[in-house]
Amino acid sequence: MVNTDPGQPLGRQARRLQATRKQLYEAALWLFERQGFEATTVQDITERADTGKGTFFHHFPTKDHVLADYFDAFNTRLLNSWDRIRKKEASDRLLAAMVLGAKLAQKESKLGRVLLGRFFVSPALLASDQRNEERLVAWLTELIQQGIVAGEFRKDTDLANLIHLIVSNLSSTVRDYVLFGGSNPASLIEQRTRLLLRAVQITS
């Protein structure tokens, strides 16, 4: 990852390495977004970052590892935005989280298209996808459990199945928008999430 533990002070050499890695990372993403993944060579990246090829491979085993770092960072930003949601009801927090996810993906749809083109052929991205899905599932599990305890959701809610549907809803809505464009993904995902919630909400 580009960022290191902020609690640990960095020496001069470590700061140089971090700065070089950041330059390579940003150069690669800039090129991927503008000319595509396949058309971008390691030499293109190192020329833009003003480093050598050996330096690139010191930081990233492959171009896919740059994308994996980006996907990790994307999900960190997403989860941080979810943590900042200030709504009382679990259902309202969930709706807000899904809308934020759609808006962030919409904002970064060009790189999203690059990611989708590599997901099923890249071991690095498959590992990143699994790692980040676990993070999203953990956040959602805690939220739904809070809703059950608060009496907002039914006690017999099938937690695992509901969360699977929520994650699938987010993934498919974002994927369809990134690949095909069309309707506002935030509005669409809010509608779909409301339909899912109707099955588990307790109405007075």
Image (cartoon, rainbow, N blue to C red):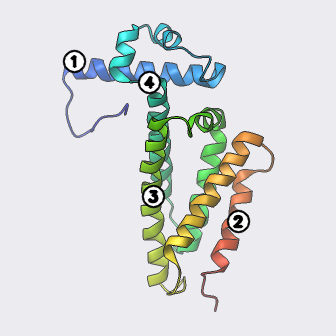
Q: Give the amino acid at mark 2.
A: Arg
Q: Disc 4 on helix, strand or loop? A: loop
What residue appears at the point 51 percent right and 86 percent down from the top-left corner?
156
The residue indicated by pointer 4 is 62
3 and 4 marks in contact (CB < 8 Å): no
What residue appears at the point 61 percent right and 59 percent down from the top-left corner?
168
Closer to the camera, 115 or 102? 115
Ranked by sequence position, the earlier of labels 2 and 3 is 3
Mark seen at residue 192:
2
Q: Give the amino acid at mark 1.
A: Gln
Ranked by sequence position, the earlier of labels 3 and 1 is 1
Label 4 to label 1: alpha-carbon separation: 23 Å
Label 3 to label 4: alpha-carbon separation: 32 Å
Label 2 to label 1: alpha-carbon separation: 50 Å
Residue 143, position as x, y percentages in the image: 47, 70
Quick check: 24 left or right of 97? left
Mark seen at residue 13:
1
For residue 92, which quarter of the picture? Answer: bottom right
Q: Residues within 10 Å of mark 4 (few under 14, many from 20)?
A: few
Q: Give the amino acid at mark 4.
A: Thr
